[in-house]
Image (tube, rainbow, N blue to C red):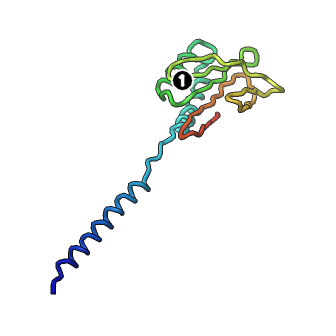
């Protein structure tokens, strides 16, 4: 009785099964990219209160804040700030420390209206306005958060 051949056959089947299992797991497991846009929105909600408290909206420090904050979060997220009152309303875009002026938002019956990439956004008009729109593209999809 020669059982040597059976041992080799069983060992080959076990090795092939283990290799196929490893290949199947490595193909199945894929790394998901973490979207930090939601964390940034929460942080900006807190920071916006400080911006309003210190009144930097009416000074040149608002531009510095936008540039510094966009440098801090990196270049994959666009930040749009809408600031001012009904007379001095303006919108600026910040990305990786670079500021770009955008078209002035419209005011329609106590509502601020602005359009970015074909999507219209609206915010209530108050005496001191500070609103933000965050936009991040990931995996062919665009994620937007407003506040």
Camera-nearest residue between 49 and 72: 72
Q: Residue at x 42, y 54 (%)?
A: 29
x and y, in percent, of residue 131 in the image? 65, 28
Q: Residue at x 50, y 27 (%)?
A: 75
Camera-nearest residue between 93 and 58: 93
Query: Height in image: 144 above or below 109?
Result: below
Query: Height in image: 2 above or below 134?
Result: below
x and y, in percent, of residue 128 in the image? 69, 22
Q: Is residue 22 left or right of residue 89?
A: left
Q: Residue at x 21, y 76 (%)?
A: 7
Element marked by disc 1: strand
Q: Quadrant of the C terminus?
A: top right
Camera-nearest residue between 126 and 13: 13
x and y, in percent, of residue 116 in the image? 68, 28
Query: Height in image: 40 above or below 54?
Result: below
- Quarter of the view holding residue 83: top right
x and y, in percent, of residue 67 in the image? 52, 19
């Amino acid at each position: 009785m020669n059982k040597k051949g059976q041992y080799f056959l069983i060992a080959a089947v076990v090795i092939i099964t283990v290799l196929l299992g490893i290949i199947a797991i490595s193909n199945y497991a894929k790394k998901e990219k973490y979207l930090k846009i939601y964390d940034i929105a929460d942080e900006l909600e807190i920071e916006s209160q400080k911006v309003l408290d210190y009144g930097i909206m009416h000074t040149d420090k608002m531009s510095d804040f936008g540039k510094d904050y966009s440098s801090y979060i990196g270049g994959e997220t666009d930040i749009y700030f809408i600031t001012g009152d009904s007379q001095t309303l303006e919108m600026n875009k910040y990305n990786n420390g670079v500021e770009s002026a955008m078209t002035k938002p419209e005011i329609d019956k106590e509502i601020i209206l602005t359009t970015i990439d074909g999507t219209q956004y609206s915010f209530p008009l108050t005496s001191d306005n500070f609103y933000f729109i965050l936009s991040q593209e990931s995996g062919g999809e665009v994620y937007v958060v407003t506040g």
